[in-house]
């Protein structure tokens, strides 16, 4: 049974409250709002898609998927998709009707903290956009990502570049060197690129890594 809007949260209630500001910004509503002039989130998503659109099948996992925008609004060729977020898609959308948000039945949404979940399936591609700065223990988080990748699978991350620690829901911030050092503990790092600020947006880092047995 899915967790509803007023459903019982798990024992990490203080963590849920810390991250609750994220519920104010469903991706689709925010990206298309008149207040979002620079469209930086959409530009960043397009950048990640263009760098990874060669997948012609298999399974994709979006950790911290929000309302599933990244899975839904690009021409991915995966056979199936799993979106995980600590808040449910019903909470983001503030509705019980999510018709049109499941990509013709290919997207499954699960609610919970990714690091605590038992996932038997392995994935060809995992995306975690603006998540690394939010998780309580980044080592546990990255080890879980590594465990969920298929042999030869890829994971991509975006995170603010050397900015954002002052945000109350952030535990840490990265620059290019510290992000490389963190990721190479678990993966073969293929690239870490600096994405420039767009208008008044923050600058971001984009990292692409490949599964490595550890």
Image (cartoon, rainbow, N blue to C red):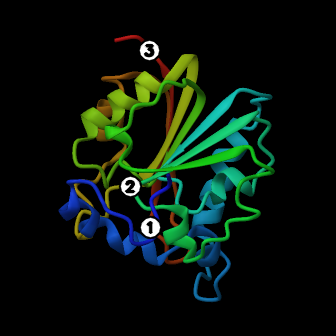
Q: Is residue 168 above or below residue 79?
A: below
Which residue is situated farthest in the bottom direction here? Answer: 34
Q: Residue at x 25, y 33 (%)?
A: 139
Distance from label 1 to label 3 (Cα)?
31 Å
Q: Are marks 2 and 1 in contact (CB under 8 Å)?
A: yes
Q: Secondary structure at mark 2?
A: loop
Q: Position of residue 54 (x, y in %)?
A: 77, 31
* Crowd around label 1: few <14 · some 14–19 · many ≥20 (10 Å): some
Which residue is situated farthest in the front direction here? Answer: 1
Q: Quick one: 113 or 64, which is closer to the camera?
A: 113
Q: Residue at x 74, y 57 (%)?
A: 73
Q: Is residue 18 above or below residue 80?
A: below
Q: Is residue 29 above or below residue 120?
A: below
Q: Indicate left or right for 202 with 173 as reference.
A: right
Give the residue number, with chain letter if any, for mark 1: 202
Q: Secondary structure at mark 1?
A: loop
* Crowd around label 2: few <14 · some 14–19 · many ≥20 (10 Å): many
Q: Residue at x 58, y 27 (%)?
A: 123
Earlier residue among tags 2 and 3: 2
Q: Secondary structure at mark 3?
A: loop
Give the residue number, with chain letter if any, for mark 2: 161
The image quarter containing residue 19 is bottom left
């Amino acid at each position: 049974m899915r967790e509803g809007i007023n459903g019982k949260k798990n024992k990490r209630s203080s963590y849920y409250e810390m991250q609750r500001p994220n519920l104010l910004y469903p991706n689709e509503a925010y990206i298309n709002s008149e207040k979002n002039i620079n469209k930086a989130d959409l530009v960043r998503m397009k950048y990640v898609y263009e760098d990874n659109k060669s997948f012609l099948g298999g399974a994709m996992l979006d950790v911290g998927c929000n309302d599933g925008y990244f899975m839904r609004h690009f021409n991915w060729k995966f056979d199936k998709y799993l979106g995980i977020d600590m808040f449910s898609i019903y909470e983001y959308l503030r509705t019980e009707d999510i018709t049109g948000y499941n990509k013709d039945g290919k997207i499954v949404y699960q609610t919970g903290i990714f690091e605590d979940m038992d996932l038997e399936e392995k994935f060809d591609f995992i995306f975690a956009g603006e998540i690394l700065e939010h998780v309580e223990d980044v080592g546990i988080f990255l080890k879980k990502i590594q465990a969920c990748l298929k042999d030869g699978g890829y994971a991509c991350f975006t995170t603010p570049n050397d900015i954002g620690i002052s945000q109350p829901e952030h535990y840490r911030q990265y620059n290019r060197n510290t992000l490389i050092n963190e990721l190479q503990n678990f993966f073969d790092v293929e690239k870490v690129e600096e994405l420039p600020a767009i208008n008044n947006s923050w600058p971001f880092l984009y990292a692409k890594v490949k599964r490595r047995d550890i």
